[in-house]
Amino acid sequence: MMELTVKITNAEGLHARPARLLVSTANQFRSDIFAQLNDQKVTLKSILGVLSLGAEQGDVITFIANGEDEAQAISALQEAIAKSGVGVVYE
Amino acid sequence: MNNSIPQEFVFDRDLVQLHARYESKEDLINSLGSLIESKQYAKEGYRESLLKREIEYPTGINMGTIGIAIPHTDKNLVNINTIAVAVLEEGIAFEDMGGSVEVIHAEIVMVLVMKEPKMHNSFLKKLIVMLQEQEVVERFRNATDPADIEEMLKQLI
C-alpha cells in the first residue's frame, strides 16, 4: 500500500477539472485507489466519490493505492496534481 | 469582508423547467444560459462561457439510477447565487465528467450559478448524496410545480 498526502490549495477546491483528471488517472491503473478526507474514504475511480468529498481549499486529502501497480499509480497522481495546480504534495 | 455572513442565494421558480424537451445539450445550455443572463443572475457572456466550458470539461454524471449534468462556469461572471433546473421528458446526451467514453443520458440538468466555491462544493456534495435516494429521483421526475423542486433544493444550501 502506498499513500500520497495533498493539501488543496486551489481557491475553487477539488472542482470539475482536477476531479476529472484525477479520476481518469486513477482509472489507468489496476490497483484499488482511494481518496480520504477526514473519516470519509471514497474510490478515486468514480467522479461520484470525488464529488461527494466536497473538498475545499485548505483540506488535506490522502490518496491510497493498493495493488500491483500502486507505485506507478501514486507517481501518476502526483504528476496530475502538479499539472492541475489543485494542491501541493506533502513530502 | 466577513466570511461568516451567510451567502445570499436566490431560488427563482422561473428558472425551473419541468417536463422540458430539448434536442441537445447545446440547445438546453443556450436556453438556460440566456435566461440566467437576461434575469441578470450572471453577466453578459455567461451563456457563451457555459457552453464553452461544457465542451472543454463535461459535467455529465451517472448516478446509477439516473443521469444528471451540472453545467457551470467562471464564478467571476456570476452576479447572484442561484440555480437553474431542467427536468427532461427524455434524457439528452452529455459527456462524462469523470473522463470516460460513457455517454450520460441526463434527465436532470442543474446549472450551478454560484460565485463562492464553498457554496458550490457543498451544494454539489449534498446533491450527490440526496440523488442517491430513489424516492428523491422520483420526486424530481414527477414534479409538476417548481415549488416541489425548490423545497428539495433549498435544503442543500
Image (tube, coloured by chain):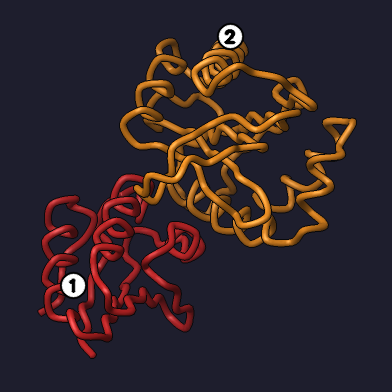
In the rendered image of this protein, which colour is used for chain B?
orange
For the residue marked with disc 2, what is the amino acid? Ser
Q: Residue B86 at what x, y percent from top left?
A: 68, 29
Report whether A32 appears left or right of B129: left
Image quadrant for the C terminus of chain A?
Answer: bottom left
Residue A73 — which label?
1
Query: Outermost residue toward the bottom?
Result: A1
Identify the residue under disc 2: B38
Res B142 → quadrant:
top right
Q: Is residue A84 above or below residue B150?
A: below
Image quadrant for the N terminus of chain A?
Answer: bottom left
User: Closer to us: mark 1 or mark 2?
Assistant: 1
- Tell me whether circle 1 and circle 2 mark residues in contact (CB < 8 Å): no
Chain designation of label 1: A
Residue A16 — which label?
none
Q: Is residue A12 above or below residue B108?
A: below
Chain designation of label 2: B
Count the marks. 2
Mark 2: secondary structure: helix
Mark 1: secondary structure: helix
Q: Residues within 10 Å of mark 1 (few under 14, many from 20)?
A: many
For the residue marked with disc 1, what is the amino acid? Ala
Q: Marks 1/2: CA distance?
A: 46 Å
Q: Residue at x 22, y 83 (%)?
A: A3
Q: Is residue B1 above or below residue B30?
A: below
In the rendered image of this protein, which colour is used for chain A?
red
Q: Residue A26 at what x, y percent from top left?
A: 28, 65
Report whether A36 appears left or right of B138: left
Q: Residue A28 at what x, y percent from top left?
A: 24, 63
The foreground one among B113 and B50 is B50
Q: Residue at x 42, y 72 (%)?
A: A43
